[in-house]
Image: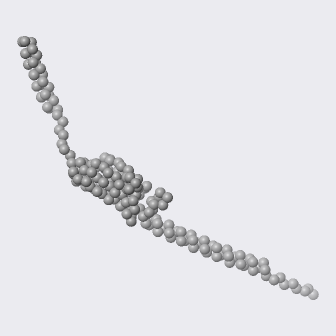
Amino acid sequence: MRLKGILLILTLILTLLLSTTLMKHTVRCEAVGLAQVIIEVMGERNLVLPKATVLVFYKDKLVERKVCDDNGKCVMILVGGKKYKLVVNFKGIEKVKEIYVSPWNTTIIKVKLPVYLVVFGRPITFSMFITLIVLSLLILIGIIILIYEITLWRRKKVAMALKPVKVGIRG
């Protein structure tokens, strides 16, 4: 009996010693306000831009990378109450935007890129679109002038070929 008592006392002392040692090294956990962030990527004229890449930076450190779905949307969970930098890229056309995410809320962020339309999978800005139209018109005008000049040249050649030859009598 006496041995059981001594073992019980030693066990209690050892438990107290271990618990005080563990209490010195406890990990402190805080509740953070997580927030859902919905990012909608669109072009000019509310053109949907699917598969755009979204990078989220906090203090110049990449914290999240997502690719948007076919509707140009992506959803991510971020720590609220902080400012982030968004970098949105759609096939080489990029936009940087600073955002603030409020804790415990859903934040919807709309990012508008200067994409006017997508032709054969290539994004085209409005200025590129106007340039393409002007170049097409200039090429068309050049072709019309070339055809007209060739027609005039052929008329001259035909006129010279059909010119009557004077047959003179030598005397």
| Residue 157 versus residue 169 in the image, above or below | above
Tell me: 73 left or right of 120. left
Number of numbered markers: 0
Looking at the image, is 29 positioned above or below residue 158?
above
> Seen in the image, is 159 located left or right of residue 43?
right
Quadrant in the picture for the N terminus: top left
**Spot occupied by residue 4 in the image (x, y as percentages of width and height):** 9, 14
**Nearer the observer, 59 or 16:** 16
| Residue 150 in the image: above or below residue 106 | below
Q: Quadrant of residue 73?
A: bottom left
Estimate the x, y position of residue 62 in percent, counting from the top left: 32, 47
Q: Quadrant where the C terminus lies?
A: bottom right
The answer to whether any part of residue 68 appears in the image is yes
Q: Is residue 66 left or right of residue 17?
A: right
Display coloring: one colour
Q: Position of residue 105 (x, y in %)?
A: 23, 53
Residue at position x 72%, y 79% from top? 156
Q: Residue at x 18, y 40 (%)?
A: 29
| Residue 96 can be seen, yes or no | no
Q: Is residue 15 above or below residue 127?
A: above
Residue 49 placement (x, y as % from top left): 40, 58
Horizontally, is 11 left or right of 94 in the view?
left
Residue lying at 84% horizontally and 84% vertically, measured from the top left: 166
Q: Residue drawn at (26%, 55%), measured in percent from left and top?
A: 107
**Residue at the extreme right:** 171
